[in-house]
Image (cartoon, helix red, strand yellow):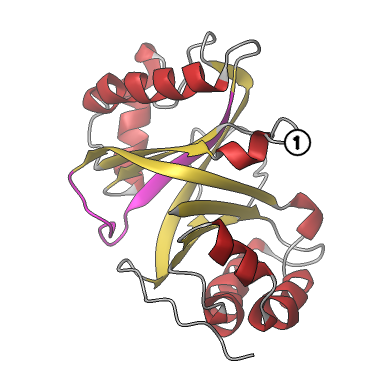
Amino acid sequence: MIHQHILASPRPGMTEAAFQDYWLNIHAVQYASKIAEIRRYKVDLRVDWSGAPGAALWSGMAEIWIANEAEQLASLQSKPFLEGARLDEPRWAAFWNTQVLDTDQAVIHDTMGEVAPAGGVKLMALVKRTNGLSIDDFRMRLRDAAVPQAAAIPGLLRHDVCTTRDGWYVVGEPRFDAAVHFWFESREALEAATTAMAGRGGILPSDPTLVEPRYVFPIALQEHWVIGPAARPYVPAAA
């Protein structure tokens, strides 16, 4: 199943709070969720975090699960997308700053399941492999390193590694090679883990032989399921 990440920021003149409210309560419900090919869908809203690297690049992220490439193509050609979600995006999002990444998801560590606890916070980062490292070696090393890393992080509920799908390398080099996810019970638990891991390389991948340190972009988020966590059946929209 394709696990798509879509990071976005407010259109000029719109506050982050208004942007987040519109995305979660209007766009997600009235537009995006009407796309039949979307099997699971959640909207993650940015929260403040002491480890954030300066000004926020994005104010939230949508996560979308679609069964395969054929259904993904169908979604992009569908009326709910072309005449609904796509036309709605300029009303709230700076579309020129939107980052999209299709990935394959691997669960490394999980004591939580699919639903974060109330008040739970997720640390997510987009990462780029170091120059000269093959994509196959990067994927293998990232997943191998994630197992002991997850065991060392205090308070970690779940850790997923999502690597960019092969199709993104057909005609060029994508901006990012993976998205890594770390769940915690609360913002305080994330802050405590950040402090505890400060002397051990931090929570995020940091080995310069694996990732390019300049291209690790973290964001702290709170998740909101719109469709799911159980996948809904695919019922093609009427023509």
Is residue 43 one of those drawn in magenta? no
Residue at 61% over, 75% down: 22
Is residue 202 visible in the rendered structure shown here? no
Find residue 199 and report its horizontal and vertical position in percent. Answer: 37, 12
Q: Report the front residue among 167 and 87.
A: 167
Identify which amino acid the numbered label 1 is placed on.
Val
Find residue 107 and report its horizontal and vertical position in percent. Answer: 30, 40
Seen in the picture, residue 2 relative to 148 is either above or below; the reply is: below
In screen coordinates, is 78 left or right of 172?
left
Q: Which image quadrant: the N terminus?
A: bottom left
In screen coordinates, is 13 left or right of 158?
right
SS under mark 1: loop
Q: Start and end of the magenta stretch?
A: 111-128
**Extreme residue toward the left, this view:** 111
Is residue 117 one of those drawn in magenta? yes
Residue at 35% over, 69% down: 231
Q: Report the front residue among 144 and 56.
A: 144
Find residue 12 and report its horizontal and vertical position in percent. Answer: 82, 62
Residue at 37% over, 25% down: 143
In screen coordinates, is 150 left or right of 19?
left
Seen in the picture, residue 186 relative to 165 is either above or below; the reply is: below
In screen coordinates, is 35 left or right of 1?
right
Find residue 25 and report its horizontal and vertical position in percent. Answer: 53, 79
How many other residues sit within 10 Å of disc 1, few (<14), some (14-19) or many (≥20)? few
Q: Report the front residue among 57 and 147.
A: 147
For residue 239, what is the image quadrant? Answer: bottom right
Is residue 168 visible in the rendered structure shown here? yes
Number of numbered markers: 1
Seen in the picture, residue 231 relative to 163 is either above or below; the reply is: below
Seen in the picture, residue 135 relative to 47 is either above or below; the reply is: above
Where does label 1 land, which residue?
171
**Extreme residue toward the front, this view:** 70
